[in-house]
Image (tube, rainbow, N blue to C red):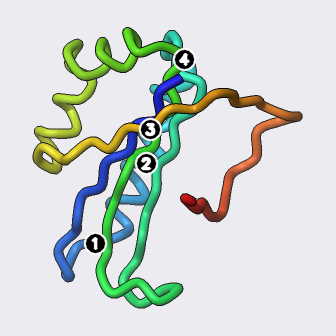
């Protein structure tokens, strides 16, 4: 499985409410994407939890490399680049992932 993550720095005067609305509006569009195990909308807000800048990012867990490639070339990523510009996509690999119980919104995420 492929983990893909990209970050967009936001201007200091960016209306964070607009970013939150975008995530709420677009969230359901990802519910039935083939071979997508997980999609997270991530927001870092300047002044909260020690953040010195604001950023908006996305985190994906793709079941196959082909599905990730299709995301990049099918037009789904173009929606992102049209709105925020092209970001450096960081990739990692996961050996296993499981969903347990009902989905509940995550309040934080960490990387190690």
Q: Residues within 10 Å of mark 2 (few under 14, many from 20)?
A: some
Q: CA distance from mark 2 to mark 1?
A: 13 Å
Q: Which mark sits nearer the N-terminus, 2 or 1?
A: 1
- Disc 4 target residue: 63
> In the image, which disc is placed on residue 15?
1
> Closest to the observer: 17 or 57?
57
The image quarter in which residue 7 lies: bottom left
- Disc 3 target residue: 92
The image quarter in which residue 76 lies: top left
Question: Is the residue 84 above or below the residue 110 in the image?
Answer: above
The image quarter in which residue 103 lies: top right
Q: CA distance from mark 3 to mark 1?
A: 31 Å
Q: Position of residue 94 (x, y in %)?
A: 58, 32
Asked whether the beta carbons under mark 1 and mark 4 sit within 8 Å of each other, the answer is no
**Secondary element type, mark 1:** loop
> Closest to the observer: 103 or 95?
95
Q: CA distance from mark 3 to mark 4?
A: 12 Å
Which quarter of the rendered picture does the C terminus lie within?
Answer: bottom right
């Amino acid at each position: 499985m492929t983990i893909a993550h990209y970050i967009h720095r936001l201007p200091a005067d960016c209306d964070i409410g607009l970013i939150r609305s975008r995530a709420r509006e677009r969230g359901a569009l990802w519910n039935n994407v083939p071979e997508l195990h997980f999609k997270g909308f991530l927001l870092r807000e300047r002044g909260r939890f020690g953040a010195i800048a604001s950023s908006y990012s996305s985190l994906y867990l793709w079941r196959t490399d082909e599905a990730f490639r299709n995301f990049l070339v099918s037009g789904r990523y173009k929606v992102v680049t049209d709105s925020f510009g092209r970001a450096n996509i960081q990739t990692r690999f996961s050996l296993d992932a499981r969903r347990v119980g009902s989905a509940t919104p995550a309040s934080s995420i960490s990387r190690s």
